[in-house]
Structure formats: structure tokens, C-alpha cells
Amino acid sequence: MTSKKIAIIHDWLDKKYGAEEVLEQILSLYPKADLYTLVDFLPENQRGFLKNRKITTSFLQNIPFAKKHFRKLLPLFPLAIEQFDLANYELIISSSHAVAKGVIIHPYQTHICYVNSQMRYAWDMQAQYLKQAKFGFIKNILAKRTLHKMRIWEICANPRVSSFICNSKYSSNRLKRTLGRNSHIIYPPVNTQYFIPKDITKQDYYFTASRIVGYKNIQLIIEAFNLMPDKKLYIAGDGDDKKKLSKIAEKNIIFLGRLNKEELRSYYQNSKAFIYAAIEDFGIVMVESLASGTPVIAYKQGGASEIITKNTGILYEDLCTESLIEAIKKFEHNQKTYNSKHCINQASKFSESNFKNKFLEYIKLTLIDS
């Protein structure tokens, strides 16, 4: 396997989020592999994991307004990803949450796709996406038509993948429903060597970290804490909805902006509990909190149900302020139940070393069978 020429495909590089954490570990396993991506606008201070690797971008890179607005070019993504010439590679590994899985391959090639997510805005989250976008009538119709075409394209591109790896059971179930494909499950890597507990007394605040955009449901968390003025909430992150949400937040809610890694770890370590309301395919931030010795209060749908156990946090039933408030009250009543050791032990299941070992083993077995 090591003698094979390998290409790694990633949707795009503009910020280092969860999908890029996965990409970092895949790249570390294949230091000689070439990297292909639609656009590369990753800031210099976030590029260390790329290690000066050869990167090939698509024609979208050279469109004048692409750096700030490349996501508006969504209708061109399928065309752009199909233009990469991968004829010289034997093994293709795609890390995909959008179109990376759709590269064109040849019969002699093996294509293994790690699914961080599918295009949720085109599938199960289309209605929520369009509602939050608040398009006018004509734009709404055009958006629906575009997303319809994206679904058709993804179904057509599906046979180009030899085998799928999904990042959770939740993600795997969606893939089965939408594309009719079975998948192997390997949970994403979390740096449990960095996110560690600190021998301190917890401070009297709750914490959440997220991109501040609609589907992350930060507004729901804010509305819940607005009704609990005696409880302090810190919010880390940035995004399109930050300005709007900061206006409705009461004085007990503090926006921290985008934190560096060290600051993020400190807030995890010191907080009473981490609050989460998004429906994620997995949710790396929840594991980072557990690794830091801090329990999690999260909505039960999505990857949260595969991360949180009865000794490491609470899964609340309904995506509403009343359900979240009730979960926080339950947490405070039984706070001694959530031991840091339980949190750390649970987080260890999602370590980087576990990810690497399972990923390499799966690639090896797939190539033997191909």
C-alpha cells in the first residue's frame, strides 16, 4: 500500500474546523500524498498541518470574488470537482462534507470516501436552511432548484466511490437512506493529549463553542439563559448571526469571539458543563469538553447520543428552551454524578491514535479485497 501513488481530496480550505482536523490526521498517515481541493484560502496561521504539501485547486480559486464568497458558487462545485485529472493515482481518499466524493475515477482506481457529513442543506436540512436564509419568492424557487440538482448530482456521482467510511451511526444512517450505500464507521479524531483536565475547582459558568450560524441553534441556548439570569454563559465562536444574537442576549451571557486553542481548552476545563444544541453528524467539541474533564448537556439527536453517556452528561429530549432549562436543573441537582474520570475515559475512545489505527486497518483490508 505504501508504494501506491495517493491523492487526497478535500472540499475546500478556508478555516480549520472539524473536517480539517480529520484531514490533518489523514495527511499525517500519507505524507507523500498530493492534496486536491476546490479552493485554498486557509490563513497562514492555520496552515501548519499542511506541511508545505503540494496542493492543487480548481478553477474556482481564480474567480475574483471567490475568497470571500466562494460558497455562493455552489452550482459550480460539481463541475469544478470533476475537472481534476487523477489518472496517475492508484488510491484516492476523499474527506467529504460536500462534493469531494464526486471526483471522476478510472476502473483501476480505488476510491475510499470519509464522510464528515453530506450536503445537509440539500437533504434533511433543506427546509431549515431556506427558512433561515429568508430569500424572496424568486430566490427561494431558484435555491430549491439548485439544491434539487445537487441531490441528483450526488446520486449520480455515488458509484464513483468504492467504499464509504462514516463518522457516526447517525451519518451512516443518512447515507443509507439517501444513496443506498452501506458504510464502515470510524469516529473522528480528537486531540485527547492536548484537551486534558486541570486539577482545579470548577468556576460558576456554563460554556458553549460553535460557529454562530442558524443551524447551530445558539439562539435557543441564549433564550434559555435569558430566562436564568443567575447562571452565567460564555459563548466562543464567530459567525453571521453573532451581531443579531448579541442584541437579544442578557447581561449574564458573554460573547468571547473566536478563541485560540489554548484559550478554548481553558474555558472547557473551568466550566461547570458544556452546552450544545446543534444536530451534528458527530460533534468534536463535545468530546473536547469531555477530554477536559467537563460534562456535556446536549440535544439527544445526532452524534451526541453516541458521545454522551449517563455518567458524562445529559441528553435533553426536545429542541426547545424548556427542555434545555430542565436539563440544566437536573444537572445541577445531580452534579456529583458527573465525575471527571468518567468524562476522560469516554473521550479516550475518540483519540487520534484510535482514529489512525482504525483508518489504516480499514484501508488495508479494502485494498486487499479490491
Image: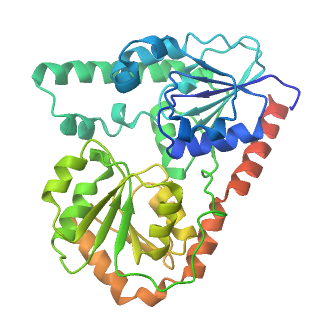
From the top left corner, tell me how far across and down residue 268 is, in percent: 47, 68
Task: Give above or below for 309 relative to 306.
Answer: below
Where does the C terminus fall, quadrant-wise?
Answer: top right
Task: Tell me if residue 307 can be seen.
Answer: no
Q: Residue 139 appears in which quarter of the rendering?
A: top left
| Image position of 82 with respect to 136: above or below | above
Across and down, in percent, residue 3 comes to 89, 27
Quadrant containing the N terminus in the rendered view = top right
Q: Is residue 365 left or right of residue 199?
A: right
Against 363, residue 298 (above or below) is below
Picture quadrant where residue 202 is located: bottom left
54 or 75, nearer to the observer: 54
**Left or right: 338 with respect to 7?**
left
| Image spot of residue 215 (x, y percent) | 30, 46
| Quarter assignment of residue 33 | top right
Residue lying at the far right of the rendered structure: 3
User: Left or right: 225 with respect to 50?
Assistant: left
Q: Nearer the viewer, residue 76 or 104?
A: 76
Residue at point 73%, 49% (across, down) = 356
Residue lying furthest front = 45
